[in-house]
Image (cartoon, grey):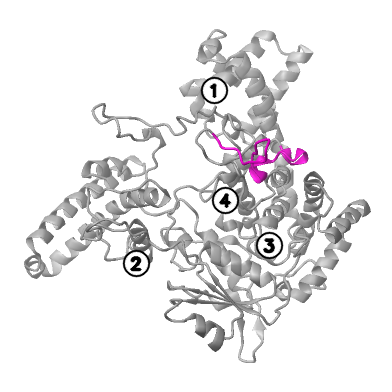
Amino acid sequence: MSQLQLGLSDFTYSDLYDPQALSRLHSVFVKSIADQSLIGRWNAYSASGGEGMGPVDISNLLVDMAPYVGTFIAKLFGIEDLRSAQIALADREKVIFEFKRDFLQRRAMKKYSTLEKCLAVGTISELESTYESLKASNADLFSHADEELGAARLAMKVAEGEKSGSIGTDVVAKFDAYVAACVYDEHLHEKVKYWASYHIPKNLDYDNLVQIIRPESLIPEKFIGPEEEYRRRDGFELTDKRMNPREVRGETEYCIFCHDRSKDSCSKGIHEKDGATKKNPLGIPLAGCPLDEKISEMHMVLSKGDAISALALIMLDNPMCPGTGHRICNDCMKSCIYQKQSPVNIPQAETGALTDVLRMRWGVEIYGLLTRWNPLNIRRPYALPYSGKKALVVGLGPAGYTLSHYLLNEGFGVAGIDGLKIEPLDRDLTGYIDDNNKWIAPKPIQDWSEIYNHLDKRPMDGFGGVAEYGITVRWDKNFLTLIYLTLARRNSFAIYGGVRFGGTITIEDAFERYGFDHIAIASGAGKPTIVPMKNNLIRGIRKASDFLMALQLTGAAKKNNLANLQVQLPAVVIGGGLTAIDTATELAAYYPIQVEKILNRYEIVMKENSDAFVESLTPEDRLILDTFLEHGRAVRAERERAEATGEKPNFVPLVRQWGG
């Protein structure tokens, strides 16, 4: 942990948790804006609450004001250099997206729409040779050791050379054909497949949104995904580490920023002439973001590399944004203005803005401050002092923790309870009341890595309900830890795990014994669905939500944990929703870990007391054990093969062979 010296001498770190100090901070921020025209517009907006202003006027005002928030926060935390570096990088990389839009898509691919047309100009070898020759004679364009950036600069120079006549038409034709061939030719595409500039939007076919393969003609109902799309999972590490910053900028550059015409359907939805919500060809209502997040506005600011300002825009309507975004929600994408081709990947952009801030020095503190003070929120720019009113929030999943945040900012004292055990955080991280009844501020976190854990080693905090136990490692649960920590630092918020409402505490207890003024029930998502089917809980059958919770709650997912969670293959998952899909993928990932752990443990036991162990087994136990040992050896052999060849083990064929 490091000490944090704020960039404003009149404020200390502990002031950032004091509503009265936040009020003072807000006044300092407003006075710091030198643009009198802007502050006049802003004051009028704040005084009217937006009454009489159109959505375009409000959006434009928010976009104008957001960079001042970023500038102020960067100064407050002494990270002006980091923010300036992010903005400079985005400016330097703009040429990549100009290349993608103006050269690759609008020029090269229009001239050469197929590989055959490219080859009419020259062989692959000749086209590649032309590119390499131009690259060698323009080495200064590749000075950043960044092939994609250099190639984009080279393309722009070729376009200029064509206009001036300094580059011959034959060379230009071959270069253009090379650029297009990188889309179509397997050999050339291998070089550029991870370039943001070559992420080309695809036309949408609503009858074939997901590519599938039907491997058995006699069983047409059976289908699988393309082999090249599979991920070689080995345990329970994060399966999708999100887009990198350049790819995120690619998404924001793809956005057409339609808020200035009030056409930002990603936020507002798409409507018929009579005002009804339009539906896509699959019958899904295109209602847009359920939080009315300022998406287009955020994209415009983020495209300039200003992550702090973009995050402030996101958190205006979605302060708990670590719990949304990539791998969680996509209503915004469904309603994107692009309805006939790939939509903008808005969840990636949202999470990308948050991640860019968290990567900065004091990024955790910046996010936390924006939950308590966000000047873009004219209705509640800073948290109110404790009013004396107390609320009990039942359930600490996404609904419960989000409601708790809003209640705290309205001045309520909040107690959040959950039926599951919640592990306490280090009091140095959260702050605490000392023996003299004085609140001690938390120790500031300089680097995100101080609280970040790899998911296969991350201890389960228990906080977050269905977000903790019902969501798999497709989502980075360190974001859940961030929300937990941020709320736990509020000194008018108390968290109690292992408390069942209606049992441990009743409604009468809450009102009469503990003096709560309000009770909010937010406990629905974690309740398993009981199928009305005879014998549906006999041995060998589990509820999918129960399996997911057991997998994580017991620690069975961890390789060094001996948990009592046994699964056998073949396995059938009934249902096709999110819980069913998560259950199928996690079962397939868990089975190799399970049989490998059993094999390792079996070998230890057989060395110590083999006779007693064998005698204790029933015939059925022996049959199951023999199967697990056979499979465990196959898993071990695949791991050894992969290690010898320097690649990740591939357990997919094994699990399929065993009935996964």
Q: Could you tell me how far apart the alpha carbons at marks 1 and 2 are, in whole angstroms?
A: 49 Å
What amino acid is labelled 4 in the image? Answer: Gly
Asked whether the viewer can see residue 204, the reply is yes
User: Of the residues shown, which amino acid type is indicated by label 1?
Assistant: Cys
Q: Is residue 115 above or below residue 478?
A: above
- The earlier-in-sequence mark between 1 and 2 is 1
- Seen from the viewer's position, the closer of residues 594 and 379 is 379
The residue pinned by badge 3 equals: 366
Which stretch did the figure color magenta?
257-280
- Residue 657: in magenta span: no
- Kindly report which numbered mark, 3 or 2, lies closer to the viewer in this rendering: 2
Estimate how packed mark 1 is, as few (under 14), some (14 to 19) or many (20 or more) residues with alpha carbons within 10 Å.
many
Q: Secondary structure at mark 1?
A: helix
Q: Which mark is residue 182?
A: 1
Q: Label 2: which residue?
A: 554
Mark 2 residue type: Thr
Question: Earlier along the polypeptide chain: callout 3 or callout 4?
Answer: 4
Q: Which residue is mark 4?
A: 325
> Residue 399 appears in which quarter of the rendering?
bottom right
Q: Nearer the viewer, mark 1 or mark 2?
A: 2
Nearer-N-terminus badge (2/4): 4
| Chain-order first, disc 3 or disc 2 | 3
